[in-house]
Amino acid sequence: MRRRLLLGCVLVLSLLSLTGCWNRRELNELTVVVALGIDKAKDGYIVSAQLVNAQEIAAKGGSGYATPITVYQGKGATVFEALRRMTTEINRRLYLSHIRVVVLGEELARQGIGDALDFLSRDHELRTDFYMLVARGSSAEKVLSALAPLEKIPANKMFSALQVMKENWAGVMEITLDELLADMLSEGIDPVATGIRLTGKSEAAGNKSNVQKSKPDAVIQYDGMAVFREDRLIGWLNEEESTGFNYVMRSLESTIVSLACPEGGGKVGMELQRVQSSIHARVQEGAPAIGIHVKAEANIGDVECPMKVMELQNVPPLEEKLEEAIRSSVQAAVTKSKTRLKTDIFGFGRAVHRDQPKLWKQIKGSWDERVPGLPVEIQVDAKIRRVGTVTDPVNPRKE
């Protein structure tokens, strides 16, 4: 009897473990979202979703679709409601796990993005490693509606372009949702996001004929960095300022710097590699002071001057010019963010908190007021490691 009772209990417990796929969804019930755009409406939000037309992507010849992607819109009091309203038009559930980028309209960004980001950070379907972009001078919907040359899915182009540029160009920085939220919620630092702009004839951006031209009438391109105070956009860094910011805030793999030749006119092209930096805080006359130290190695890429780069005495003048170019870019970013925009995007407050914790406890309540007058010293050490395989300039007119 006991044996039968024990066997029955085992069977009941095993049945309880067979819960099945309670949240299973068939593929024909879903539509894949690869990008989201969020704009401000009068009484809520307008959310745009870039959806993949699978038949158009798979087709080798013509198909019934005009474009490989479709952009749908939904309006609601919250981002969550706007997305759910969108399903009344699409007649499928939105699958959000493949989102590559989220674009925020500039108007929304200036009013504040905190509430709009709540859904993105809370929803269990969403990965938080997608890139956050701010549409510069336009709505997010216009950016998402633009088709991209060489890539059928614009969201993939925006994502892969950032991947390539972060390895080859210092003027752009990629920011994920995780990073943006961490900076928004941390003391002693203000957040930034990547700027993206629709250039050319915006009315042509969504036409398939636009990207079939050798020179499209409208394109989307990355443009500077959006600077926030708490969750509100208050200004922009241009390319030079963004480059200086990235010298300090990222371990750059590679970028290009063009220098004026020490004499004789022309330019020298340098490839910066292994750019590393550190920020330290010290106490100066009872107040905080910041030191930035940037180290860089460089290779000579091209030479337009009548100089023999193989001769050792010609290298130090180029290193000095390179150090000055890096210092100038960093100074431009510090001046713009600290003095003009009155923000701490470099995390100087975080450095004070780390290096001078007692002082930080005393001044953190007035940190925002201290930032514009904060003394910042910039030190740059640059070394040229390789000069290439050609000893003299190729152009004989330079001799």
Image (spheres, rainbow, N blue to C red):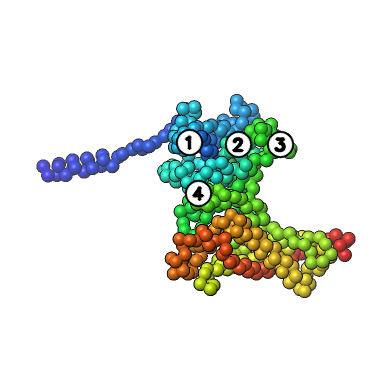
Q: Earlier in the sequence, mark 3 or mark 2?
A: 2
Q: Nearer the viewer, residue 18 or 338?
A: 338
Q: Which residue is mark 4?
A: 231
Q: CA distance from mark 3 to mark 1?
A: 33 Å
Dot 1, crowdedness within 10 Å: few (<14), some or many (≥20)? some
Residue 288 visible, this angle? yes
* Residue under the point 60% across and 47% down: 195
* Residue under the point 60% across and 25% down: 64
In the rendered image, the quadrant that contains the C terminus is bottom right
Q: Earlier in the sequence, mark 1 or mark 4?
A: 1
Tag 2–tag 1 contact (CB < 8 Å): no
Dot 4, crowdedness within 10 Å: few (<14), some or many (≥20)? many
Q: Nearer the viewer, mark 3 or mark 4?
A: 4
Which secondary structure, mark 4? loop
Q: Earlier in the sequence, mark 2 or mark 1?
A: 1
Is residue 319 shown above or below 234? below
Q: Which residue is mark 1?
A: 44
- The location of residue 311, given as percent across then percent down, is 78, 72
Q: Please tell me the numbered disc located at residue 217.
A: 3
Amino acid of disc 1: Gly
Which secondary structure, mark 3? loop
Q: CA distance from mark 3 to mark 2?
A: 14 Å
Q: Nearer the viewer, residue 203 or 8?
A: 203
Amino acid of disc 4: Asp
Is residue 216 shown above or below 397? above
Q: Please tell me the numbered disc located at residue 142.
A: 2
Q: Nearer the viewer, mark 4 or mark 2?
A: 4
